Every structure is written in structure tokens, then in C-alpha cells.
Amino acid sequence: MAMSSQSESITATTVAFYPVPAVLYFLFLYVSAKVAELLMAKICSGFSELSLDHRRNTVSYVLNIFWSTVALGLQLAASPILAERYTTERLDLVRLAALIISGLYIFELTYRPSLRMSILIHHFCTLFAVVLIVCVLQQTLHPALPALGLLWIFHASTEQGVFLGLIMYRLRLSQIQTQRVLYFSAVQTLLFKFTFSIYLFVWWGLKLAPNHEHPIDVVFSVLFVLTLTALMGTQGYGSWAAWSIARSMSRGPGPEVGLPDANQKKEEDSRVSGSPHSCACAPRAQRSPVILHKVASDPYLRYIDEQTPS
């Protein structure tokens, strides 16, 4: 029987369609995560002392910084569509940025052993919004939808500062620098995301809300408002969590965290000074397994797992 693939209509919802670039991207995410694990273990001795959950969280922060920056570059290149200057190349850039963020979030859902509810809500809202926009665009071909998707993805591609601060906090680098990064990124992400959210509502109100010609337009508008509202809630919580981490560092961990006393710290410093695995980014004092276990019980460390990479 002759092949008829050339005459078949391939759409974004075609079940039997095999997206080779997307599959290769997922494979590359897996390889890049393994490479990041090896590099982090060689560069920072403190990384190897973390639990499996915290090591994978740290690696996911590294991947988020890199891939969200790539997506941000694609979005900036496609930004003229916000002025309704549409071209095929710019629409392709928006789709590619959406694929990068979607694949990154799906990989994170499977790679990290556990995720807090706020992160789950954030990721599912983002993925649902991308799928919704793609499906509605396929049905209505409304030119304002790609710009709406471009604005939505900005919520996920402007969080590099938060991830950098979380990496520094998890590896226990300079307290002052970590606090500065977390304080700045908490405010920056909150301002950016709420600005983009307002822009989204305005764009939807001007370009899409007045054009409810089909039932699918009404359904899209209702789901859009509900999803964006839920996403804004998780973003506000994420900024508060980053701010709380920085503030907790000023107060100090307290005696219940189990930090070593001065004499014990001196002994550990003397042992670490000759360690072949020490490096510039590793903490100067290595803690015993018992102390590390107590440190892991610090309630403020839970904020890291609740932070959205929003």
C-alpha cells in the first residue's frame, strides 16, 4: 500500500504525529542533567553532601537558569509581534520558546523526587495555558493568540535571579551575597510577573474579549482568566518564599539547627584545609553527617522546595 503521509494533515493535536525535535530535546535535558550533576560534584564539595532530593533540586535550578535564558532570548527576538508585526519566523520563535519551557517543566516534574503544591500548581497552570493557546489558535487562527502566548511565557523565563539565589543558599555560599541575590530577585520577579500579568489582561481585553464569535472563544476567555489568576497567586507566594529565606539568614539558624560550636568549627576547618575536594565555591567548614541531618530539619529550608521558578 502506498504511503499517504504527504497528503495527511498534521496539526498540533494529531495523535499519531511523532515530534522528533521534542523527543530529542527531552533526551538532551536528561543528558544535561547528568552532566550538571557530575560538574557540580567536582566543582563544589558541598554538593556531594546534600541529600538526593536537594542535589536534584539544585541541578534543576541550574537547568532552569540555562534553558529559561535561551527561551528569553527567543522571546525577545520575537517581541515585534506585540506591535502586531507578524512573520512566520517570529511565530516559530514563539513556538520554540513555548516548547523549551514546556519540556523543562515536564522534565522537572519527573526528575525531582518531590514537589511542593505551589510548584505543581505553577507548572500545571503554565502547561495548561500553553496547550490551551495552541489548540485555540489551531481552531480560530486569531493573530492575537501568539502574542498572548509570548507574554505568558515571560512569567517562566525571567526567574534566573531566584534560581541563582537558591543555588547559593543550598550550597551555603557567602551569606551576604546570597541574601542580596534573594532579596533582589524576590522583588524583581514579583514586579516582572505582575507587570506581565497586567499586560496579559489588557491584551486579552483589547484583542480577544470583544471578538467572541464562537463558543470556543468564550470557553477560552473563562479558562484564561481562571488560569492566570491561579498563576499570579503562586507567583506572589514564590516571591514571598525567596524573601523569607533571605530574612531567615539574617536571624541566624539558632541552636536548634545544630550548628557546631566554635571549637568544633576550628577542628573541622583544620581538617578541610587539607581536603583535595575543597574548592572556591565550597563552604569552608565541613559539617558532620549528624549536623547535616539537623540542618536539613531547618524549617526555612522547606521554602526552597516551595519556590516556583516562576
Image (cartoon, helix red, strand yellow):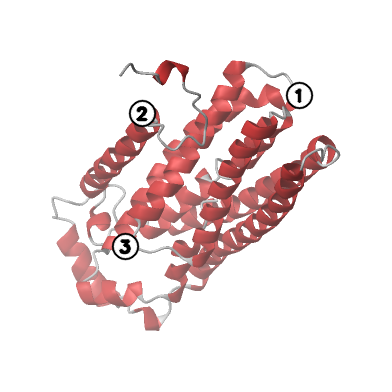
Whether 180 is drawn above or below 118: the answer is above
Look at mark 1 in the image and give the residue it sits on: 83
> In this image, 287 relative to 102: left or right?
left
Question: Residue 200: image x %, image y %?
Answer: 73, 42
| Mark 3 and mark 2: Cα distance apart in space | 31 Å
User: What secondary structure is marked by label 3?
Assistant: helix
Question: Residue 291: image x %, image y %?
Answer: 27, 75
Look at mark 3 in the image and give the residue it sits on: 53
> In this image, 9 relative to 32: left or right?
right
Of residues 247 and 41, the one nearer the viewer is 41
Look at mark 2 in the image and give the residue it sits on: 20
- Lower position in the chain sequence, tag 3 or tag 2: 2
- Badge 1 amino acid: Ala
Q: Residues within 10 Å of mark 3 (few under 14, many from 20)?
A: some
Checking the image for residue 297, the label placed there is none
Q: Work out whether residue 195 can be spotted.
A: no
Q: Residues within 10 Å of mark 1 (few under 14, many from 20)?
A: few
- Lower position in the chain sequence, tag 1 or tag 2: 2
Residue with the most extreme front position: 1
| Mark 1 and mark 2: Cα distance apart in space | 32 Å
- Badge 2 amino acid: Val
Tag nearer the camera, 3 or 2: 2
Q: Residues within 10 Å of mark 2 (few under 14, many from 20)?
A: few
